[in-house]
Amino acid sequence: MSVHYTLNLRVFWPLVTGLCTALVCLYHVLRGSGDARTEPPEGADGGFPLLKVAVLLLLGYILLRCRHAVRQRFLPGSPRLGGHSALSPRHLGEPSLDILLESYYEHEVRLSPHVLGHSKAHVSRIVGELVRAGRARGSPGPIPGGALALAFRGDFIQVGSAYEQHKIRRPDGFDVLVPLRLPPLVALEPRSLGAEPALAPAFHGCFVCALKAPPGASGGHWLRDCKAFADGFCVDVRGRRHLSATLVLRWFQSHLQRSLATVRYSLEGRCRVSLTPGGLEQPPTLHVLPCRTDYGCCRLSMAVRLIPAVHLGDSVFLVAPPLPPSPVGPLSELPGGLRADALWGVNTARQEQKLLSWLQERAPPGACYLKCLQLLKALRDLGARGLDPTAATQWGRILSSYVLKTVLLAALLRQGAPAQGWDEAHLGERLEELVQFLRDCLLRRRTLFHCLLGPGGAAAEVGPLPKVLREATPVDLLATFDRQARELAAARLLSTWRRLPQLLRAYGGPRYLARCPPPRNQRPQGFPEDEP
């Protein structure tokens, strides 16, 4: 994604005014401190008064602001919008949807590349020191060390929207995978649960990992040799020992706390760090706070989720599964002898990054794939305004960032590469198509399958995938939610899209756009009136 820098006039002109005022004050101080200062004759002006200078600078600032507002409102659109007029043809003087989207994107959505780059570099340095310290310490868990110890592999993998160039608003949250190294005597046999008929849809994307002997190991000796590891990190499922995500996560949090104590002193000069445990099901969060002696330009408080990951092969990892997005009953009552603490989720972030890069490489110059995804996230956030906490939580779970990214990938893969018509001149049209596609997934097709799991995934575009993923049952990301929840989400999505011009005027962009009265009956076209 190409990045660009824009001049923020709301900061630039006040800064120029303050600088000029400071120079005038300095000039008068230097004049007054001269030893050989001559008194002006009686009745003569003793110099240009400071008050006049300040008034002139203030008038110049007001005139320049008015000139900028008039140009933005009445002149044709910029080349970035393809040369289209900034005026709506039906409502003279009203900004078009493209102008409103562009203004909202620049002022409320787009991250500063400078700040984002500094934040990622800061996170990389801190996590790198923490992981290296954890690797050097060895395993303090149920197995003190040796050939059967669980340990850090020594590297870390940055995943999520901040590293895929579609994060919005603030660079204050990051996800980092911390790969673990299994003992040489331990091998895993992962199995997808998508074909389990009695299992709730929320768990169809989960996996279980049974222990097995590595090639060349004899069964009896292997069971005896790896007993210590199995007792510390495994549970019994259907008569076999399975690696437990809960026990691994508990060890991981304890090991991180000890590693953080090792590096805390060396980090005191740069930042303050603390670790918040995530409980038995969620990974811990590393909080990074700027210290008082840090005079850097990007003094942000950041939260970094450190996710323990077991390498499955070909840059695919098993991680602790997220909590079910809707009530599915007690986790201890899973059918078929399954145990909740033996469930694992799959993380294909690196493969998804390859898929996004593959699409970007084949896209025409100036394609706005990721910009549409950012605006789709912003549309979701606008739709959450006014909802009570319970409804807002459900809305955010149904339209999660991962679901919205899957919508974009599915829409692009349906069109084929290179997809045409994705230049910024058609930004509003492409965003409307994504909203309509998401609405259809919620109402008509009622399905939105994972892009990489199953035989119909996009494995050919991202390279080889482990066999267990290629043969897995396709996972519907919306199957967890009942029909009523999907219909309510679709209705809210459609309502938000219809009110989008008014919402953009009210919540974003320059204040002169907010003063424009909303046009009557203005609504983006493309949806029938009789549907929710």
Image: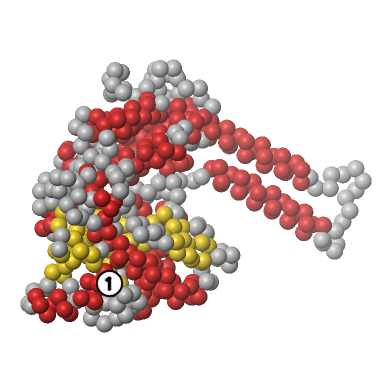
Decide: few, some or many residues near mark 1? Use Cα within 10 Å; few <14, some 14-19, many ≥20: some
Say which quadrant the C terminus sits in: top left
Q: Quadrant of residue 321?
A: bottom left
Name the residue rendered at 15%, 57% in the picture.
191
Report the side of 52 relative to 296 (left or right): right
The residue that appears at 44% across and 76% down in the rendered structure is: 262
Q: Residue 203, relative to residue 464: is it above or below? A: above
* Residue 518: percent from left, percent from top: 47, 22
Observer-nearest residue: 234 or 260?
234
Extreme residue toward the right, this view: 42
Q: Which of the two residues, 6 or 165, is positioned nearer the viewer here?
A: 165
In the rendered image, which quarter is residue 309 located in?
bottom left
Residue 520 image point, x, y percent: 44, 17
Give the number of marks.
1
Residue 108, image x, y percentages: 46, 41
Residue 292 in the image: state x and y as whole percent: 59, 65
Specify how the rendered protein is coloured: secondary structure
Q: Residue at x 29, y 51 (%)?
A: 331
Residue that carries the numbered disc 1 in the rendered image: 232
Residue 380 showing in the rendered view: yes
Q: Is residue 28 above or below residue 529?
A: below
Q: Depth check: give the residue in front, 465 or 429.
A: 465
Q: Amino acid at mark 1?
A: Gly
Vertical arrangement, residue 529 with respect to residue 209, above or below = above
Label 1 sits on a secondary structure element that is: helix
